[in-house]
Amino acid sequence: MKKTLMGMLMTLLLITTYLSGCSGESGTSESKSEDKGSSDKANALHLKVVIPHFGGDPTGTIVQQEYEKEIQNYLGTEVKIDWTRIPWAEYTEKTKVMLTSGDIPDVMLVRGQDNIIKFGEQGLFVDLSQHIDKMPNYKTYIDATGNNEQYLMNENKQLFAFYDGYTNPTDIEPSQYAAAYRLDVFQKHNIKVPTTLDELYDAAKQLKALYPDAYPVGQSEQYLEYDGILSANHTAGNIYWNGEKYVYGPTEEAYKEALIFLNMLYKEKLLDPAYWSDNMDEAKTKATSGKSFIYPLLWSGYVADFNANKQAGVTWTLAMGADNPKYGKAWKYGSEPKGKGLSNGSGLVISAKSENVEQIVKLLDYQYSDKMVDLLMWGMEGKSYEVKDGKKQFLPALIQSDDFVGELAKLGVSASMRTRPGIVFTPQERIAKYTSIPDVMFYHDGKAQMENYWFASDKYGGKESIAPMDHAPKMMFTKDESDLKANTMTPIETYVKESAVKFIKGEMDFSEWGKFQDTIKKMGDYESILKLYNDKVQQ
């Protein structure tokens, strides 16, 4: 009770802080832009802004300073911003109180399109569809987003947010996820780095014989669950787009085959019993202490963390996910699209009570211009990047430093993902993002070498590794439709998840698969939800 009361008081204090415009600590920081000495202060644009931060405050960095200069030159007036930056982990909860109270700043990031639509329809946010002619830069992102009216707007074609944008000026569609193997151990015992599920099984058996106290196959994060195996079988653990229509993965034979494979690993003690509970901290300990040797899927950046442990002295390598020849090339997890576009999971909104709405629209739209995207994502030429053979690249001195990402963050370069200048979210230029990380070990075709894991995943995976769900038609559901989905699918998904664990552990026999499918049907009309999805594709 005391903790709850304290949390409420802290949230109220936060609201009071941003309304009063006072300064605070960097954790939920507020800092005012410096007075630029404008001779016409009466026309100054004065804003209160609430946005998340990701560990680094951009105030005073060269990119933030250049950003402030640019927006003032573009608008032709002094711009004074009172910033409230809330840690990302706390952002949703703390801003929920602001939205519910109706007391919001001039501009804020709102997470969840359901919140954006809900509070927009209540009149809390400016309807940007009425200002579309004043948003030439943002409109290019809207136009490039498939099925944009249904995906970004409500039923009345109202647009309430500057949604999270991306731009990829190349043809690559890479992923930041891959398989990972303890390369030094594989090489020591002359074990083949797997390219198929059968080879993964054989490698795990050899490793178990050599290290009986270890469980060769581990899990890095619970949210990935069985995706490394499901992707090899060209299926998923939920409703997904299969390239032609939406289907429910757990009803497919390929899903059953994935569970059979995992059950085989479990029965032979090749699969870590903590597979369902391990988080990254626990996985890292096992990866560096000889308790795990194989991760069918993990975030690629973790391999650098494993190998950085000099005391452990391990060598891990990334590789493309193991294939199941029956289905072809394993799907990559979360391939990123080429070109420009918008994601509707969060967006910047403008308070309907704000003055100078046209100026605010103009400011936020400017953040979607190529010039500002380059500034925020790459920084400044000669200070953070250079142009070589017509292409931008981060300065070699930064790349070769002991902490490349940290050096980018100090400059305020958004590609660092630690320090985010401007009014975030601003569009991410993918090449800056891809090249803002150090190279890591990547294994392919019998050899391992240092490579950029984004580019390696595209180069070695090819187009056939792009999962169809990553090109799924974009759509949005009404509140009633979302409620119907949740009411129908939540009990089914809970049952499926619990049953999958039982099948893998052998607590349910695969002879009961038909009964399992019948129970899914009895628990809810999932086929009507699939019809809802597929009908929207036809709209």
Image (cartoon, rainbow, N blue to C red):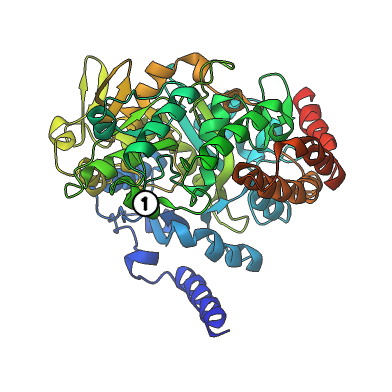
So how many labels did they put on this image?
1
| Residue drawn at (77%, 43%) of the image | 478
Q: From the image, tell me which residue sits under label 1.
A: 78
Q: Residue furthest bottom?
A: 2
Instruction: Tell whether 428 sits left or right of 244.
Output: left
Question: The N terminus is located in which quarter?
Answer: bottom right
Q: Is residue 46 visible?
A: no
Comparing 358 with 480, the one in front is 480
Q: Which quadrant of the figure has residue 440? A: top left
From the viewer's perspective, is 261 left or right of 24?
right
Q: Is residue 86 above or below residue 181?
A: below
Q: Is residue 93 depicted above or below 248 in this figure?
A: below
Check disc 1 and give the amino acid type: Glu
The reply, left or right, for residue 534 in relation to residue 197 is right
Q: Nearer the viewer, residue 524 or 505?
A: 505
Query: Is disc 1 placed on a helix, strand or loop?
Result: loop
Answer whether residue 460 is visible to the viewer in this image: yes
